[in-house]
Amino acid sequence: MANKPPGYGSRRPNRDGEPTPLSENNFRYVDQIERWRQEYERYTAVEENLTALSKLSYDPVDYAPLLVQVPWKERQIPDFSFLVEEARVTTESKFFIPIMTRLAGLVLSIIILVLSSNTTFLWVPGALSVVLMLCLFWEIQQRQNAIKSALQDAQKQVETRTEQERQLIENEKKQHELAESERVALVEKLIAGDIAAVFLRIDNVLSRIGLPFPVDVHIDIFENVPLIQILLPPKTVIPLQTCSLLPSGRVKHTDKETRTVNKQYIELCSAIIMQIMSILYGNIPSFDRAYVWGLIKSTPDNECLFDVAVNRDELVKACRAENGITAIRQLASQFETDTMLNLKVIEAEKPPEWGNVPQQLLRSMHINLLK
C-alpha cells in the first residue's frame, strides 16, 4: 500500500470546495461547546434566582441598641514640639557657612602672622586677624539672636496649632453629639410610627432588596395601617423550558407542562409578596395589621391576583414555611386559579380600618425594585 501523503484524512472540503484543516474544525467544535455551556449556565442562573426567592426568613431589626447614643471617642492632640527643633536646626544651618568662612580666615591670618619673618608687614595679618575676629564675634552674636527669635516664633506656632486642633476636636465632638441626637430622634420617630421616618426607612431597605426583575411597590398608609400594592412581574419571566447539559457537551431543552409553568408563577408571586412583607415587618416596628394586593399590569387599571391581610405574629409563623405558596396560604389570603392553575382576577377591598377616608388623607410612596 502506498504511503499516505501528509495531511491525508485531516482535511475536508469547505463551502468553496477547498479543503478545511482539521484544526479549524476542532476550533469550531470547541467554540460551539463553550456556547452550549454558557447557554446552560444562563438557564441555570435564571432558575436559581427564581428558587432563591422562595427561601423565606424574618429578621427583625433590634432598635434598642440604636436608642443609645454612641459615646464620643476624643482623639489626641498631635505633638507639635518638633517645630521648635526644626526652627533651631534651620536657623543654625543658615549661619554655618558664614561662621566657618570667617573662622577659617582668622586661622589663616594667625598662621601667616606667626610664620611671617618680615616685621615690616606684621601689621597687615595682625589687622586682618582683628577684623576677622570681630566679624566672627558679630556673626556668632547674630546667630544667637536669630536662634532665639526663631525658637520664640516656633513656640508661638506650636501654641497656635495646638489651639486650632483643640478647637477642631471640640467642633468634631459637637457634630458627633448632634448627629447622634438626630439619629436617636429618628429611631424614636420610627418606633412611634412617624410617617416621614417610616417612609425613609422603607425606601432605604426596599431599594436594596435586589430582585432579578422590575417590581413596583406602591404603599398607602392611614392611621399606621398600610396597604401595599405590589405590581408583580409578568408570567414571561418563567422559562418555558428546562435545560440540561449532556455528557457530549450539547444542551437539551425540554418543554415544561403548562401547569408546571403556572404553578411556578404562583410560587414566584407568593414568594415576592412574602419577601417584601418580611422586610417591611422586620424594619418597621409600628406595623401590625397590613393589607397586600398582588397586581398584574393591565389596561386601563391594574388587575388584582392576590389579596392578603396579615399581622406580625401571623407573618412570623408564615416565614418558617418551606416556600412562598405554603407561606401565603397560612395567612388570610385570597387568590383563585382555574384547572390549569392560571391565576384569576379577583376583587380587592381597601382596609376596613380606613373606613371612607378620602384619598387626600392617605400618605403614599412608590418604589421600583430591581437588582
Image (cartoon, rainbow, N blue to C red):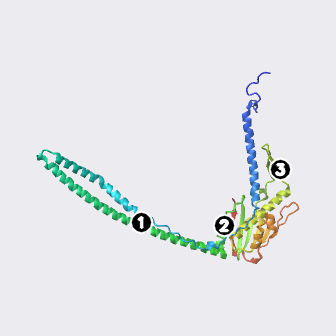
Circle 1 sits on which residue?
Answer: 161
- Secondary structure under tag 3 reads strand
Nearest to N terminus: mark 3 or mark 2? 2
Task: Tell me the CA gap for discs 3 and 2.
Answer: 41 Å
Q: Using the image as rendered, state which of residue 255 and residue 215 is in the foreground.
A: 255
Tell which tag, 3 or 2, sits nearer the viewer: 3
Circle 3 sits on which residue?
Answer: 254
Q: Using the image as rendered, state which of residue 106 and residue 296 is in the foreground.
A: 106
Q: Position of residue 61 (x, y in %)?
A: 67, 69
Residue 297, image quadrant: bottom right
Q: Residue at x 27, y 52 (%)?
A: 100
Q: Position of residue 318 (x, y in %)?
A: 78, 68
Q: Using the image as rendered, state which of residue 254 and residue 338 is in the foreground.
A: 254
Q: Residue at x 72, y 34 (%)?
A: 23
For the question of whether residue 298 can be seen, the reply is no
Residue 7, image quadrant: top right
Task: Tell me the CA gap for discs 1 and 3.
Answer: 76 Å
Q: Quadrant of the N terminus?
A: top right
Q: Are marks 1 and 3 in contact (CB under 8 Å)?
A: no
Tell which tag, 1 or 2, sits nearer the viewer: 1
Disc ID at residue 203: 2
Q: Position of residue 186 (x, y in %)?
A: 61, 73
Q: Position of residue 67 (x, y in %)?
A: 61, 74
- Secondary structure under tag 2 reads helix
Amino acid marked by disc 2: Asp
Amino acid marked by disc 1: Arg
